Image: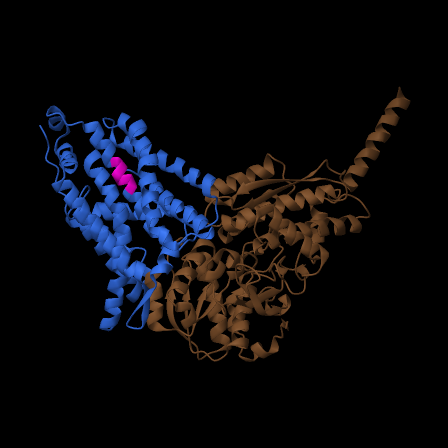
Chain colours: A brown, B blue
Amino acid sequence: MLKRTLLGATILASALASAAHAQDKPEEITIGIATFLTGPASVFGVPARDAAEMLVEDLNEAGGIDGVPVRVNFIDEGAGGEAFTAEYRRQVQDEGADIMFSGISSGNCMQIAPLAEDLEVINIMWDCGTQRVFEEGEYDYVFRTQSHATGDMLALVLYLLKTKPDFQTIAVVNQDYAWGRDSWEIFSTALKAMKPDVEVVGEFFPAFGAPDFSTEISRLSATRPDVILSTSWGGDLNTFVQQASQRGLVNQSQFILGLGESSLEALGSALPDGVIIGGRGDHYFEHPEMVGQENFDSFVAEFKETTGSYPIYSVFHMVQAFEALKAAYAKAIEDGDGVWPDDQALIAAYEGLEFQGLGRPVTIRAEDHQGIEAQIVGTTVQTGDYPFATLENIMIFDGETITTPVGESSIEWVSSLTPEFVQQVEPTTFD
Amino acid sequence: MDYTLILLAIFDGLSYAALVFMVAVGLTLIFGVLQILNVAHGSLYAIGAYLTASIGGAIFAAGYAPILAFPLMLIAAALVGILLGGPIEYLLLRRIYHKPEVLQLLVTFAVFMILEDVQRLVWGNQPYFESSALQMLGNIQVFGVYYTVYQLILLPVVAALTLIGLRLFLRRTLTGRLITAVTEDREAAQAIGIDANRVYLLTFVVGAGLAGLGGALASPTTSVLPGIGAEMIVLSFAVVATAGLGRIEGAAIAALLIGLGRSAATYTYPELQVLVPYLIMLAVLLVRPEGLFGSPAARKI
């Protein structure tokens, strides 16, 4: 009797000891992905969901993560506000999501970051652009696998000042919400710092989803600014560019479309030559450094075949979230000598992680969890190779030089830049 | 602000007013006759736009002449009126004319929600853009600014013709007079042998068709995407409320006021642009709660 009890106690003790050291491999890894399935932003959200489904299928076919299959649940950011946070909470608490990817909307990211911290779930901000999250708060569980608005905007300003330095006036037409306002604040602050004599001659913030920009276009045609910036996206951007192109405004002023990469295919022949286009990172389906690499070419081809469209930046951002996940698990398992990692081990792996999606490698800063991502900017040209405009005179900016340093506020940092900064930054060019 | 800018602002206001009027007129016609505020009007507008843009895109891609865009708009409007407007009135609204207004509002709102999802099912989430009609008519230059003929001339002309046509139809034709009679007093009209049900059905089909035509006319100027129906219905309500419910000429004046006010704001103080239609509505309703042209309802005892 005593013998048996001793034996049982020994087994129990050793079992407890090993449990304290490591978790067993789970049956599967559950990921909750927040993306826009409805609403205007579904132009980004739906292609990204399609990409996630493709990636998970490929990943599981290849044996999952260290033999553990991955399962994804999607939640709709389009639900917005409390409905969205309630669903997020449900994913973590009831569906047992091990990790969350959220999301596209900056507003949702600002809301989710403290919630993820409360729920103690690792949250990957896979697409949202607000620079505020890590500048105004500090989080253990929240990471970003891509750049933020400052890098996106700074690359555009630098490209403009490098390629068309001789202009005097600029006007902006942005959507009337956080992104439209914030991106213009960063862009205009940076521009005034690096080109102090520039004059802003028009600031238009038409309502989000506005169906008609005719009046703004007439006003701009009468004002004739040298440069017109728009960081709008989706239907708003398409409508604005189509209307501006129909009425000759695109030929009158130099257009800069910060998120234009995502509308190249949709705009088709309406987008004339010579428009400056950004890609929210180095995302482009003909990325000059990636074309010819097997994984890039096969992904673009598979995506085109599955969805009927070429991948846009939100798709590449989704790829990065998955590549970061794979890299983080690999690193954590290696650091833990093959033991399956718990959340803390995974967090340690994400800090300072270097991984590569379908662009240049990305680093996640250990200090503030911000991703350092390169930026691609180019000028449109209708070559006839595709039924839509592609990019020429491409520049790729290294992420390190154009991302706000750790602990600094973006607006203060860009306002401290000088005209010399334009020459100091040396992007890669392609001929 | 010099006089050319004022003229430019007026042009912009006119072409915008024309589009808004085309949608608001159907809404106000339906309210005038059926006494129902049709929230689903926004969906009918959106579906008119979707039909025109998607069918147009398909047939022009197949090599047909862009001139077909114009008959296509009329066909799209007729389809919306007959295939959607007809069944909505016949199967649904007919059962609720005697029910409280709140219920009527809820029913048309439900139809609106259903049709929003139908659009998403049929046309997906990606925006459609099909502007062959607009491109075909070309541009004209006014004070160094390019306008499209479609927006500056065609839209206001169509709106004016619609207004005049409706007026003549209601006052000079037999069917029009029947509609007017039923609007005045349904029971009396029925007593002298007018088939009020038929008149209601006809009016709703025409009103729905006008919403579809509004969408079809707007489609070459804008991206057609989920949510455009909601956008338009809110603005149309503002126009109809400003005008006085059921007033067709009033809707034209209110649309003009709102169009001109909006473009004046864009030229002088763009931040106000979104607010202007509602500021105008508020100002009008404070002074005349029944709207610009509405008459205070007389109580029937």
Q: Residue furthest left?
A: B301
Q: Position of residue B223 (x, y in %)?
A: 41, 53
Q: Is residue B60 among what the camera can see?
A: yes
Relative side of A285 to A177, left or right: right
Is B158 included in the stretch rendered in magenta?
Answer: no
- Closer to the camera, A254 or B50? B50
Q: Which residues are magenta?
A: B204-209
Q: Relative to residue B210, is residue A139 depicted above or below? A: below
Q: Position of residue A3 (x, y in %)?
A: 91, 23
* Residue name at image x 15 percent, y 41 percent: B170
- Closer to the camera, A36 or A105? A36
Relative side of A106 to A406, left or right: left
Q: Position of residue A266 (x, y in %)?
A: 49, 55
Q: Position of residue A7 (x, y in %)?
A: 88, 27
Q: Relative to residue B9, is residue B56 depicted above or below? A: above
State whether the magenta stretch is mostly helix, strand or loop: helix
Q: Relative to residue A166, is residue A46 depicted above or below? A: above
